[in-house]
Image (spheres, coloured by chain):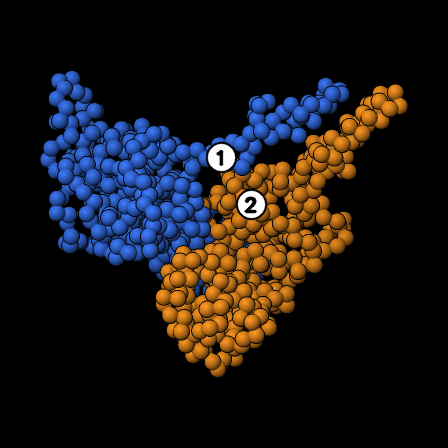
Chain colours: A orange, B blue
């Protein structure tokens, strides 16, 4: 059997959960099971959910677990296959042509016929994430291909993605076909701003990532912002839970909770009082109107409610 | 944790049977999904109930909305193999009667617009085109489908980041094509090929009020919604009543009757009251802000009669206007003689509306289509500066 990049090979969902926790990602039972199946069945993983619930983070955690590189495609409206797969380094090619011409002129000879062949060699090939994932070296850890926010891309890109996920092969006309010996680990995320095509969804294992509950969020904040301490982590989680019910333009996600805890800890504070909230509000809300709403609703109330979380029940 | 009551049944047979149950519950399951599910079952083993649950959810469900039906089917199938009827629950349509505010001037009844123009050779089709929806008979409502089908909601174009082949005078040099052509010519390399931005039509979002006061218009406007959604890609449709319901998927069928029947099943708050502000907030938070409203043309079809707080509506309209390319308000009552936007909701929302249009007849919907496409229509109001 030919050598392949080493993928994580967990025995079951519980192993996945433990391995992810070891790289600072707390996954619930559902997500652990889906990740286990994705690795075992060698299928891409499609994660849908609101912003800030940890979809992109999971891909990063998988890369830390496998020890391989995270190859990231950030989708945007109008992204085409070239940005995802490969491109020729045109500027260098042009430079090469000009140099050859100048050299020929100086020596009084002619431009060699082999010039065109020289231009289309690996030397001038820019490998973008998909090609890099497919041609990952056989010895070494498996990379993780992350297609982030695929709902921002358009139908043509989805069609290309579907084709690529079917046979994991890329054809560069001048060089030949590159094929992956083993399908790479693929994670696709979407913020659900539009429906993705059924064909793409069928190709993947699907999971809707929910906001974590209070206990889980407190644990996540404590794990990712250890400088804050468990008490502050719980207070922050409680305050954020209340903030989410206020009807903000942009309710904070888990990422904002972590940032908030880090900000408060960076100021040398260990608890969430009214002044701490006032100073660090920008870490958790990013709209002027939202900040006004929180101030109007009474930051004292937030702090008091958070304080009711002490002492933490471990 | 109850053991799976599977006896000696093979995973494949169970997978097929469960997929069948899911299809009965209305979740579309393709054959290759069933195969994947069987593989997943083999991987997690049948002994663990959470394992089986998540294996099914990852492979057979690919929309968040289907999770509820999946849960029901799962309980019925795996815990009690006999009672599978629970999986096919009947939908409850709640009819909330609204005996509250009816507008003082009332929707125009009686005189169809066609009577104003006294032309002997006025065709029937033309009469129908300008007739107020409130005065339609059932037969005319069905007939109007053909008229509506001719309205195309093209939507204004926006420049896309995609580049495509352009003319020599365009801005960006196309290195790839220039290089290939230069080499083919065997020598002189001139950057002749150019690129230009391609255009794509803007997304259009339609929010239709289906509350009691809009009842007579909603029937006709829903047909318009169907024509819009089925006509081109990138159109989203929602209904607003006591709740916000997305009906884009249901309407995306070529046959109008099927589409409207499916939409009617999905919407459970027909003819109730309206809470425009809170429903708009839900739209903004769940769909609009994450990206659906960005750079889009948003059309609100409502008479503005609202039970909620005007302040909330104003706030959410402001938020929407900051994200959308254009906000259009279509009011069926506007064409009534003597109409003035006095209703609290309407007055609160107007400062944030780019175009305030009539919406009582096919002709007015054609005018709407023109405004959406961005051709010069009369902009009724300019955005007022926000104070306070």
Residue A101: x, y in percent? 81, 25
Front in this rendered view, residue B104 or A138: B104
Residue B282 image-quadrant placement: bottom left
The answer to whether marks 2 and 1 mark residues whose Cβ atoms lie closer than 8 Å is no
Residue at the disc numbered 2: A75
Residue B253: x, y in percent? 36, 37
Instruction: Tell whether B119 sits left or right of A83.
Output: left
Residue shown at 11% from the left, 33% from the top? B111
**Disc number placed over residue B159 in the picture, else none:** 1
* Chain ID, mark 1: B
Instruction: Tell whether A94 sits left or right of B140.
Output: right
Residue shown at 67% from the left, 47% from the top? A133
Residue B346: x, y in percent? 24, 47
Instruction: Tell whether A264 sits left or right of B370.
Output: right
Query: Of circles 2 and 1, which is in front?
Result: 1
Element type at marker 2? loop
């Amino acid at each position: 059997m030919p050598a392949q990049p080493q993928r994580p090979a967990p025995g079951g969902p519980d192993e996945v959960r433990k391995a992810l926790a070891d790289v600072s990602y707390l996954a619930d039972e559902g997500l652990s099971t889906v990740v286990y199946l994705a690795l075992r069945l060698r299928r891409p993983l499609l994660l849908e959910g609101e912003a800030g619930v940890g979809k992109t983070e999971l891909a990063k955690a998988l890369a830390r677990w496998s020890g391989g590189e995270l190859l990231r495609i950030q989708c945007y409206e109008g992204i085409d296959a070239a940005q995802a797969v490969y491109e020729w380094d045109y500027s260098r090619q042009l430079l090469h042509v000009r140099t050859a011409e100048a050299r020929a002129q100086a020596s009084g000879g002619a431009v060699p016929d082999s010039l065109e062949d020289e231009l289309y060699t690996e030397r001038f090939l820019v490998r973008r994430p998909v090609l890099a994932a497919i041609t990952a070296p056989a010895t070494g850890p498996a990379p993780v291909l992350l297609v982030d926010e695929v709902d921002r891309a358009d139908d043509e890109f989805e069609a290309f993605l579907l084709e690529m996920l079917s046979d994991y092969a890329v054809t560069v006309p001048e060089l030949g076909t590159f094929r992956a010996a083993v399908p790479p680990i693929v994670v696709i995320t979407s913020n659900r701003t539009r429906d993705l095509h059924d064909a793409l969804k069928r190709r993947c294992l699907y999971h809707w990532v929910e906001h974590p509950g209070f206990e889980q969020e407190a644990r996540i904040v404590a794990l990712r912002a250890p400088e804050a301490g468990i008490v502050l982590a719980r207070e922050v989680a409680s305050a954020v839970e209340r903030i989410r019910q206020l009807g903000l333009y942009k309710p904070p996600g888990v990422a904002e909770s972590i940032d908030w805890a880090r900000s408060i800890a960076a100021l040398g504070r260990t608890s969430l009082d009214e002044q701490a909230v006032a100073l660090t509000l920008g870490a958790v809300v990013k709209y002027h109107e939202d900040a006004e709403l929180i101030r109007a609703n009474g930051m004292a109330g937030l702090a008091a409610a958070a304080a009711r979380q002490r002492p933490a029940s471990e | 944790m109850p053991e799976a009551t599977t006896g000696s049944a093979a995973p494949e047979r169970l997978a097929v049977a469960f997929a069948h149950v899911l299809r009965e519950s209305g979740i579309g399951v393709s054959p290759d999904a069933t195969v994947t599910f069987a593989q997943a079952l083999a991987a997690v083993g049948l002994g663990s109930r959470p394992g089986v649950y998540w294996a099914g959810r990852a492979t057979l469900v690919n929309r968040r909305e289907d999770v509820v039906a999946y849960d029901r089917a799962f309980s019925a199938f795996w815990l009690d193999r006999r009672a599978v009827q629970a999986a096919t629950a009947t939908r409850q349509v709640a009819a909330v009667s609204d005996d509250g505010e009816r507008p003082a001037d009332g929707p125009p009844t009686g005189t169809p617009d066609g009577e104003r123009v006294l032309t002997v050779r006025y065709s029937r089709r033309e009469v129908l085109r300008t007739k107020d929806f409130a005065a339609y008979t059932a037969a005319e409502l069905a007939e109007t489908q053909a008229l509506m089908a001719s309205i195309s909601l093209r939507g204004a174009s926006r420049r896309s980041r995609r580049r495509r082949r352009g003319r020599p005078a365009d801005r960006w040099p196309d290195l790839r094509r220039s290089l290939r052509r230069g080499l083919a010519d065997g020598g002189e390399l001139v950057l002749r090929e150019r690129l230009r931005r391609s255009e794509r039509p803007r997304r259009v979002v339609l929010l239709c009020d289906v509350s009691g006061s809009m009842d007579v218009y909603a029937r006709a406007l829903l047909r318009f919604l169907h024509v819009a959604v089925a006509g081109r890609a990138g159109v989203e449709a929602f209904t607003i009543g006591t709740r916000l319901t997305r009906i884009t998927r249901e309407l995306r069928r070529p046959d109008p009757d099927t589409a409207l029947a499916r939409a009617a099943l999905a919407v459970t708050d027909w003819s109730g009251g309206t809470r425009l502000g809170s429903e708009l907030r839900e739209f903004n938070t769940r769909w609009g802000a994450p990206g659906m409203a960005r750079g889009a043309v948003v059309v609100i079809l409502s008479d503005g009669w609202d039970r909620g707080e005007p302040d909330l509506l104003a706030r959410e309209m402001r938020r929407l206007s900051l994200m959308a390319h254009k906000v259009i308000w279509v009011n069926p009552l506007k064409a009534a003689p003597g109409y003035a936007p006095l209703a609290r909701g309407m007055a609160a929302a107007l400062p944030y509306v780019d175009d305030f249009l009539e919406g009582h007849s096919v002709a007015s919907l054609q005018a709407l289509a023109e405004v959406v496409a961005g051709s010069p229509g009369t902009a009724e109001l300019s955005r007022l500066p926000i104070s306070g």
